[in-house]
Image: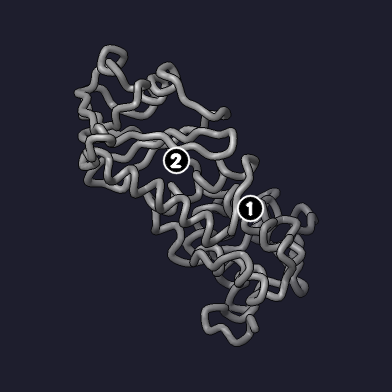
Amino acid sequence: MIALLNQIPSETKIKKLLRKIVFGRNMCCPFCNSRKVGCSESRYRCQRCRRPFSLFSGTWLSNLKLSLRTFWALLWCWVNQVPVKQTVKLCHVSEVSVYHWFRQFRLHLPDFETILAGKVQMDEAYFRNISLLMAKEIGSKKLAHQIVYKNSVNKSEASQFLFQYIQPKSKLQTDGSSIYKKINQWWQVKHKVDIHRKFQFGLTSEIEGIFGNLRTFIRRMYHHTTPEHLPEYVSEFCLRFSSPEIFTSPNDYLAKTLKPVPTC
């Protein structure tokens, strides 16, 4: 079935794309940077230091056992948010393999740190024995989040989140939870509150929508979650939301995550 997909290039085309990402314009030895490299099938050997290497030596794909087309198909499914069970049928691999590779793709996403400013909506959500604090900068795609490994959040944890992710003098918008009471005395923000029992939702509508989208994303793509993997799913969701350019294609994802060989 992979061969019927126009989105999956030939093995030769994939190899060229990967070679350009890893080595740039000139193939060179990852050990001594010599351009004197010999090639035999899919293996290379430096003619100066005599050390053999492959296309992925020194990268997180160094132990890849899949064919390049199967690997590319798995990555294509992941960047396009194809659900796990659909990916199993499409790529002709086991469900265990799909979960394994989807996790590898998550774990090698670029790190991101962001400070929110201006108008910021903040709220918390609760899962099995895990709490999630999240904030969104209004008018942008910037998100910040923090996992708390228990089934509740207290004022101290909410304050620490503010210290780390929200710029002083921002306009903070939250619900009426007690953890935010007098929060402006802990951090220099202008605080406004929605009282949900009074049907006030305007100040927190965007962050509530983000939580809804997060739950839908996990349910549709991964079908379920566990406390062990929830932090990874949340990080993936936030990066998909704030940096969609990483997920445009397998090539764009790999260009951001495969460490290239230093220029010769």
Q: Amino acid at mark 2?
A: Phe
In the picture as drawn, the residue positioned furthest to the front comes out as 197
Left or right: 105 in relation to 146: right
Tell me residue 173's x, y (percent).
Answer: 25, 32
Left or right: 147 in relation to 119: right
| Badge number at residue 15 | none
- Decide which of tag 1 and tag 2 comes sooner along the chain: 1
Using the rendered image of the protein, determine whether residue 260 is visible from the camera's viewpoint: no
Q: Is residue 206 above or below residue 62?
A: above
Q: Is residue 197 above or below residue 223?
A: above
Q: Amino acid at mark 1?
A: Arg
**Residue identified by numbered label 1:** 103
Between 100 and 32, which is closer to the camera in this rendering?
A: 100
**Residue identified by numbered label 2:** 112
**Residue at (39, 52) in percent of width and height:** 241
Q: CA distance from mark 1 to mark 2?
A: 18 Å
In the picture as drawn, the residue positioned furthest to the top comes out as 185
- Which image quarter: residue 187? top left
Tell me residue 1's x, y (percent).
Answer: 65, 84
In the picture as drawn, the residue positioned furthest to the bottom comes out as 4
Q: Is residue 211 above or below residue 10?
A: above
